[in-house]
Amino acid sequence: MATQTITNKETLTKVTETISGSEAIVRCLIEEGTEIIYGYPGGAIMPVYDELFKYQDKIHHVLSRHEQGATHSAQGYARISGKVGVAIATSGPGATNLITGIADAQIDSTPMVCITGQVFSHLLGSDAFQETDIVGISTPVTKWNCQVTKAEDIPAVMAKAFFIAKSGRPGPVLVDVTKDAQLEKLDFSYEKCTKVRSYNPIPKTDLASLEAAARLINSAKKPLIVWGQGVILSQAEEVFKSVIEKSGIPAAWTILGASAIPTSHPLNVGMVGMHGNYAPNKLTNECDVLIAIGMRFDDRVTGTLSTYAKQAKVIHFEIDPAEIDKNVKTDVAVLGDAKANLDSLLPLLNENTHADWCNKFTELYNIEYDKVIKHDLYPSTKGIRMAEVLKEINIQSKGNAAIVTDVGQHQMIACRYAEFNKTKSNITSGGLGTMGFGLPAAIGAKMAAPEREVVSISGDGGYQMTIQELGTIFQQKAAVKVVVLNNDFLGMVRQWQELFFDKRYASTEMINPNFVAIAEGYYIKAKKVTKREELADAVAEMMASKEAYFLEVCVEKEGNVFPMIPTGASVSDIRLE
Amino acid sequence: MSSEKKLYTVSIYSENNIGLLNRISAIFQRRHINIESLNISPSEIEGVSKFIFVVNMTEDNVKKIIGQIEKQVEVIKAYYHDLDEIIYQISGLFKIKSELLFEEPQIQNIIKESYARIVTVNKDFFVLEKSGRKEEVVALYDKLSAFGIMQYTRSGLISVTKEEMKISTLLETYNN
């Protein structure tokens, strides 16, 4: 029973209540505005679940079918909404099953708070049942983590967890709470955290660096912008669009930056990186000024560093000082929040068009169209190609769907061919490359944004890594459209085996089950397409469905994704075939 | 910038929290960097800990490591210095059989010449302490090892910088 006491006579408004640690955890989540959490119960977290039962009108708990699914759902929720995703699990295996999602959120800068139960504090270190050192295990893959052994510490730790997860460069935080701390009583009051002494989430922008960047951009003859997720995370989409429109600079995106401005924007010149577009990769090695905004020069973006944009002056807009000069040496580093800095940059820029330079992108696009895109979208092959499925989805969604992908060939094809009209529409595992990410992430995305069309696209390999989340779709009535592009292969690995291992297809062929029957086993409407002439109608039927829908498309078995920058090659050595 | 490996100290001012050592050492481990020595102690500021790692790295890489370390929420500031930029000491303890003091008269000369201090003597053993640069402690070890050493331990390097660190000022700016 909660008893109300006034603790501070001077501030009469500050009221505390005596409640249990587990109730405090739930109340903290409510205070932080959390409405949906994803998790899986078990012994060491049961007191919290008991409170979740009592507070179910305030917080909707989604029972995943595996804790990894819970983290990916929390990630999908965070990526589409910009809010902190929350996942919850018990100690031991429950906690270790979170690790893949946590590592994924760390490398893709996704704000997430994970709460794990832990054995009683007097049992810590005794190899108790379902005890694991999750704080130790999660340390290298969390932005911050903490073990709570006293109930009274819960409100401050939870407040700190949310603050750290969402501030600065976002990331995952894990809070491990011993069972005794959950059961103990505390005097509860909640104060949001706005500051941590040793933590400087947004480095101060040096005005001189901003002015230097503007001068360099204004004097550039062949400038190229490469933007990343930082534009989306800082909600800089509008000002970013103004910057490229005013300066007339062609802009290319990393996989996580996709959808920040519409695909159809004339200055959007496509994706950089291993399977990106021909023009921006090729011209990275011709530009005179390379302007990187909220991206981190991942090796999949740069190819071999020794031949990456060596002719260019490099400007790096970045919130994380550790990224400056980490991979690519910068001439001008502009530290700070992307939106704030682009706001300041905009008035300093000269209006320009760079027409000749932009024409080069068009010329190279035309080459890519003739050699690759045409054959992907309008193939003369018998088998269906993956890109055709994206083409049909684009027609039906008019570019307004959120596309959630897994990892592999279908992911590259989806990023290359999906049309995006709205920001936060490309949800995928970029840095970690986590197969199994897509399906549960789509659930989280759909639940966070029920008004949006959410299409999950997976390959037959990754789909089966978290296929059990169909149960979550069914139980939650989440109207996710689930597409599996089935080539009966682990396609990307097979492509590498074909190109670099003399076609020795070691363990990449998959003997697959009846996917339609499995979906129907979860009472999800399902269809399988094997012929091109059935495809358009099937996609239309799926997109028109008010409920969840499963569509298996059997695509050509040995299709390859091109263009491609082979490992160890330069971006300008990108291959079209 | 030098791409040659040399010894650097990585000095870290941080909150005094359980688990932070694990977090920081993981940063070295992940990049396959061997830690030559480590000392953790309170710093000049109350409640702020100071780590001093000694590592053998290129300046390019030590800079990147500093970035990764400073990124940790509970780290206030990290610095790297080469050995010319700091005043440093290490300490060595030598446990030796007492009978050698009488049987091997050179030992007494070695003790005198090295300015080592006798910490304790009993009928079974005596303990020598030598502080100084690593080479001085190692030189003493080399001389004594010919006679047999029962136990030998060397401390991590501790140092102060010739330049000012200005941690208090930094903390104030964070707080405002």
Image (spheres, rainbow, N blue to C red):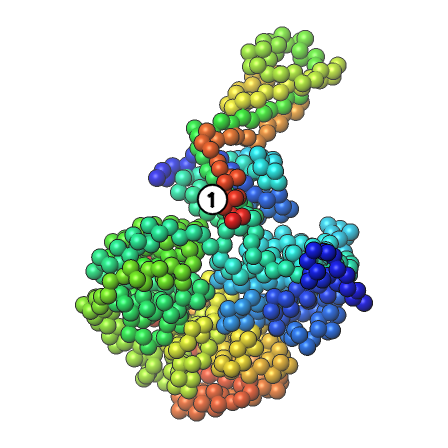
User: Which element carries disc 1, helix, strand or loop?
Assistant: helix
Q: Which residue is mark 1?
A: B66
Which residue is at a point 46% across and 62% down the rendered structure image? A431
Residue A177 seen from this side: yes
Q: Is residue A509 left or right of residue A300?
A: right
Residue A435 position, x and y percent, is 51, 68
Which residue is at a point 58% across and 25% down the rendered structure image? B91
Residue B115 position, x and y percent, is 57, 14
Relative to A17, does residue B87 appear above or below in the rendering?
above
Residue A21 seen from this side: no
Which residue is at a point 73% across and 61% down the rendered structure image? A16
Front position in the image: A285 or A408: A285
Check the image and name the residue furthest to the front.
A10
Q: Quadrant of residue A150?
A: bottom right
Q: Is residue A187 left or right of residue B115?
A: right
Residue B132 position, x and y percent, is 54, 22
The three-letter amino acid code for the residue at tag 1 is Ile
Chain at numbered mark 1: B
